[in-house]
Amino acid sequence: MLSHLALKDFAVVRATELEFGPGMTVISGETGAGKSLLVDALGFLSGLRADSGVVRHGSERAELSADFDLTGNALARDWLRGNELDEDGQCQLRRIIRADGGSRAWINGRPVTLAQLTELAGLLVEIHGQHEHQSLLSRASQLALLDAHARNEAERAAVQATAAAWQALLAEREHLQAQGDVSDRIGWLEHQLAELEREDLEPAALEALDLAHRRHAHASGLIEACDDALVRLGGEDSPSLARQLQQTRAALARAAEHEPRLAEADTLLEGAGVQVEEALALVGRIRDDLEVDPARFEQLERRLGRIHDLARKHRLAPAELAAYRDGVAAELAVLRGAGERLDRLDSEIAAASAAWRNSAATLTGTRRSAGQALATATTALIAELGMGGGRFLVELEPGDGARPDPNGAERVEFLVAANAGQPPRPLRKVASGGELSRISLAIEVAALGSDAVPTMVFDEVDSGIGGAVAEIVGRKLRALGRARQVLCVTHLPQVAAQGHAHYRVSKAPVEGITRSAVELLDDGGREAELARMLGGVEIGPEAHAAARRLLDEAIAAEADAVEAEESVRPARRSGTRSR
């Protein structure tokens, strides 16, 4: 739900901030005052292409920001989390449009692309009006609304899963077929594999080989070092370290009779003697293993040379050869079984295609039933909104079915005949902006509770109507406001009276520059504004009385509607779900 909207240097608005709550909020004002600027601002915050013309004259940039309450909007919370833009449950959209035509966008204070801004805004706000950002003109939005109305999540999931399985098999077959005659490739791989398998290329074996090679390469030096260490540590014919330790310990033992602390030194030397004996034994064992063996050294040289030759040939480090060998073996196994795999793939693809078609047929059934129900309800509402004889249809156009489509076997098109005797045409081709707005309103009311977007904006939905029809439009908007947040720009008092909150937009010259101001009206202010809308130039007591009557009737009508809903709710809970 939209909770806060701030504009600065936007068109004729110097600076303003608006707070919004649940229900229906109306925005009114004299012609040209800038009522639709609030809708335009939400449009730019929803990703519309930047227009330098919206920057207030004399300013460098326009700044727009909107805060949304995400309570109950799991889709938006998941999107923010998935894009690592979540911020303690907050959701702020911000955009700057510069006078040179450039723009930047932020979500929760972090820079984002316009595509990201558009994607998130589509989960937050839906704009219905006479402009290009009318969301229901999009076929994707129409399909999403129909599926939401059909409550067919399980059926759509089945179609997506079977489409993915079918697509994976098709991709595998295309990959195998693209390889053509693989006999030459198989022969080359077999030669490579045989060459690689002649050597032990495992990391542990390469490490042992390198160690053995270095040991034999330096055998003479190692033998000399070991012999010298043995003499120094424990030689019989020289003052070895072991003998010196023994002599030192004996001298200290005699002296310890007069200085007990020397006994501690003796204990330390005893430990050192044990260490020396262990070192002596280890060096002796190593010396026994060492020998100068030119034949063995030559053998190690040849083996190490072969491994380095392989590494140079394949442009790899020796440690990478084992992984490369395994990759060659895996590719060879695939190619050797390519023919058999292709034969099996044909049958698997046929089965996957049948599974997708069965799932898609089930999904089509849910859409057809929901489309008929939505069409019937919307047609009735269109008539109530002053378009008698008009019809609304949901057309399912079959796809070619040759490739797996995760969205199902058909495309959806909303068709409208605005007047009796006219052929139905796509909703996106309806000429009249006012008709388009009312049709959108009828669709949203008919699909009440299906659309997941929490905030709906209606711009001039009352264009070209008046009297009783205007009051019906207002009541429908107020009814929609009981389930969704509704913002409505209007010039009709019958519609404005139905709002739960009311903003008035006015303009006046300030220092020779026209500026707009936005004011939240209290009860008295609402009566005065409705009287203005009713009375024209001369606003007398009759206009005020009529305005008060409209406000009282709106409150009474909503109370009756809520009471009626409460009375039928138990029956709905006990009955079956209606599509």
Image: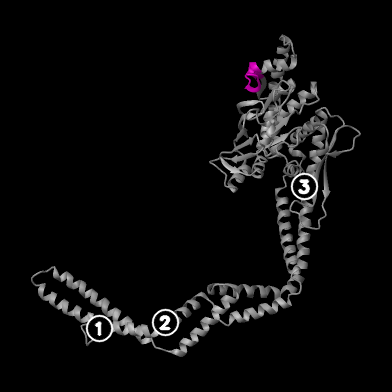
Q: Position of residue 224 (x, y in %)?
A: 33, 85
* Spatial separation of the CA atoms under disc 2 and disc 3: 78 Å
Please tell me the numbered disc located at residue 13: none
SS under mark 3:
helix
Amino acid type of disc 3?
A: Thr
* Spatial separation of the CA atoms under disc 1 and disc 3: 94 Å
Rendered image quadrant of residue 277: bottom left
Which one is earlier in the sequence, the residue at label 1 or at label 2? 2
SS under mark 1:
helix
Q: In which quarter of the image is the C terminus?
A: top right
State whether the magenta stretch is mostly helix, strand or loop. strand
Which one is earlier in the sequence, the residue at label 2 or at label 3? 2
Q: Which of 298 and 320 is in front in this view?
A: 298
Rendered image quadrant of residue 63: top right
| Residue 482 appears anywhere in the view | no
Q: Nearer the viewer, residue 383 or 79?
A: 79
Mark 1 = which residue?
234
SS under mark 2:
helix
Q: Which of marks 2 and 3 is in front?
A: 2
- Find the magenta span and give its range: 508-525
Mark 2 = which residue?
215
